[in-house]
Amino acid sequence: MPSVSSTAGGDLLLIVGPTAVGKTSLSLKLAEEFRGEILSGDSMQVYRYLDIGTAKASPEELARVPHHLIDLLEPDESFSVDQFQCLARRTIREVQERGHLPMIVGGTGLYIQAITHGYQMPDVKADATFRREMEAFADREGNASLHAKLVDRDAKAAARLHPNDRRRIIRALEIIRGTGKTLDEVQRRKPSPYRTCWIGLTRPREQLYDRINRRVDQMMKHGLLQEVAALKRMGYTRTLVSMQALGYKELMLHLEGELSLDEAVSLIKQRTRKFAKRQLSWFRRLPEIHWFDVTREGAYREIRERIAGNFPQSKE
């Protein structure tokens, strides 16, 4: 299938792929060449104070290219995919009005697809009694047990939701209960409002895993432990959705005496490698994405040519 769709929403470039594959450096070069502004497609960069572990843009990178959709919330504030979609689409429109190319860069597939497409869900009315029952169950048995209910009924939907995202888990269970079908069976993908060009980045697995391990070491060297300790002093606990971000939960466990520092760092690396694998699985489902191995000679030139062919007016 073609990787470009044309509609009235204007041009939108997407750079996706697993963590540590090299999205940041490539997207900065592309933004400078194609008059782009970068929108974070990472679900955890919306939270303030989570800087090192979420690999937010540095002051030097912010000076090179405008960035959006970062530092929107306090770590204990709730946030939904619908809210993210609304903010992102408004930002995209503003970037386009400035005559620039909006570029979504990141690895949270659900958030990115909410921007580019979104889904039409069945009109299942809220059941207050059922919701109270599920809330009581989660209070009594824990969020993991509530999430396990969704795993039993719809494993694919459960894989897209964090175990602490109680509100959306209950809504998913409510829809399944009301329709007798999984979410994939009942939701309809909306046409994209944008003319999109999807660029997917990959590199050999062993090299990617080595980059992940080295990046975690660099984050620790640059003060990730101190960042998590500061969040703990501010009163943020590991039960928050924001504190489920890779690196933060594990170091919270260390600070609370449940893991040694070496154990916590090893666990961060292990979980990040598994996360990268899940990211690739998610994006591989999307036929719009044109994939490039960034280690192959000429990959950047081919990516530039593909974007220039799709959005010729964006290139200076």
Image: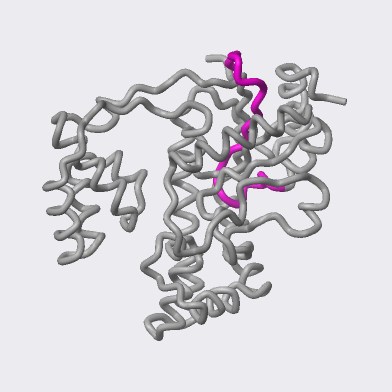
Q: Is residue 207 visible?
A: no
Q: Is residue 20 magenta?
A: yes
Q: Is residue 313 magenta?
A: no
Q: Residue at x 82, y 38 (%)?
A: 32
Q: Position of residue 135 (x, y in %)?
A: 19, 57
Quick one: which residue is furthest to the right in this view? 316
For the C terminus, give its image quadrant.
top right
Q: Residue at x 31, y 26 (%)?
A: 187
Identify whether 13 is placed above or below 7.
below
Q: Position of residue 218 (x, y in %)?
A: 66, 68
Q: Quadrant of residue 296?
A: top right
Q: Position of residue 160 (x, y in %)?
A: 36, 44
Left or right of residue 182: residue 293: right
Residue range (magenta): 4-24
Count of numbered badges drawn on the protein? 0
Pick whichever, 208 or 124, lies toward us.
124
Left or right of residue 37: residue 242: left
Report the colour scheme.
one colour
Q: Residue at x 45, y 59 (%)?
A: 77
Q: Position of residue 54 (x, y in %)?
A: 58, 59
Pick whichever, 52 or 289, lies toward us.
52
Q: Is residue 117 visible?
A: yes
Quick one: which residue is furthest to the bottom in this view? 257
Q: Residue at x 52, y 28 (%)?
A: 116
